[in-house]
Image (cartoon, grey):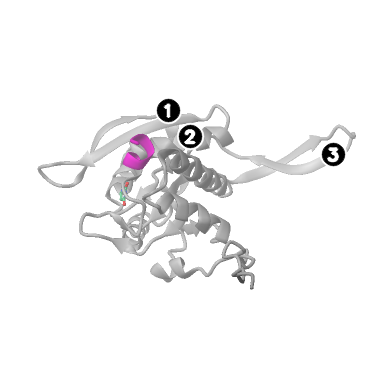
Amino acid sequence: MADQVPPSPSIAPPQPAHVKNSNLAHLNPLPPSVFTLPQTAQLEALYTIIRNKETSRGDFLFYSDRIIRLLVEEGLNHLPVIPRTVETPTGSVYNGVGFEGKICGVSILRAGEAMEAGLREVCRSVRIGKILIQRDEETTLPKLFYSKFPADIASRYVLLLDPMLATGGSAMKAVEVLMEHGVPEERIIFINLIASPEGLTTFCGRFPSLKVITGWIDEGLNDKAYIIPGLGDFGERRYCS
Ligand code: URA
């Protein structure tokens, strides 16, 4: 008698477009200034790849770049627009909108630098500043080591780039420095791949007028301040093989 062929495990049932937002329960209620990407199965599949410790550096780059692109697009959705009327090639008038103000990116080094390319892909010739914050060994507090911003940053909307929001210490220091350079809190949009509930609560509590765009809210932090389940050290995975 011929062997019975077992049903193929590769034929998966159709995926629902949206997965259960159980990760959002890690911070309930969400602060009103926090916006997550739509928690679809597609997005969760991208996160599953970049979280996997077996994922190659090439795949980590490719799939984290896909998420970064979605985050930047979502960040741009929060910029104000003003009415703009154009004439189309058909001779018709179209009453649309245009962006109101100028933007720039500011990456928190070093991991935030990985998000610059995603911003440039979407906003051609965007100005990008940089900021380096590290732990002061004496005080253990986040300390500014280096910053370079466009001269007119005070008149721009700032997309502040950092992939991992753990304790929130670096992000808060970066916002302080931006505000010292004249950027109003409400003109800052923080763009982030993975946030811890603790970091989000502290950050948004301190700066309630800035907006946070995050892709995923994880469970918490371990005793080394790594995000759990997280993806490990973003910079290591991105820059080292
Ligand atoms: N930075 C990282 O790269 N990973 C974490 O989990 C936390 C901070």
Cα–Cα span, label 3 and label 1: 36 Å
Residue at the spot 21% in from the left edge and 54% down from the top edge:
224
* Res 3 quadrant in image: bottom right
Residue at the spot 51% in from the left edge and 52% down from the top edge:
46
- Is 216 positioned to the left or the right of 144 in the image? right
Give the magenta range.
235-241
Q: Name the kind of residue labelled 1 in the image.
A: Pro
Q: Position of residue 57 (x, y in %)?
A: 41, 39
Asked if the stretch drawn in magenta spans residue 197, the answer is: no
Q: Reading the chain from its start, which is encountered first: label 3 or label 1?
A: 3
Q: Position of residue 152 (x, y in %)?
A: 45, 29
Disc number for residue 93: 3
Reading the image, the residue beneath label 2 is 104
The kind of secondary structure element at disc 2 is: strand
Reading the image, the residue beneath label 1 is 150
Cα–Cα span, label 2 and label 1: 8 Å
**Residue placed most toward the observer, 6 or 162:** 6
Q: Is residue 126 above or below residue 139?
A: above
Q: Reading the chain from its start, which is encountered first: label 2 or label 3?
A: 3
The kind of secondary structure element at disc 1 is: loop
Q: Name the kind of residue labelled 2 in the image.
A: Cys
* Res 12 quadrant in image: bottom right
* Res 184 quadrant in image: top left
**Residue placed most toward the observer, 208 or 44:** 44
Q: Reading the chain from its start, which is encountered first: label 2 or label 1?
A: 2
Disc 3 to disc 1: CB gap under 8 Å: no
Disc 2 to disc 1: CB gap under 8 Å: yes
Residue at the spot 78% in from the left edge and 43% down from the top edge:
95
Image quarter (top left, top right, bottom left or bottom right) of the N terminus:
bottom right
The kind of secondary structure element at disc 3 is: strand
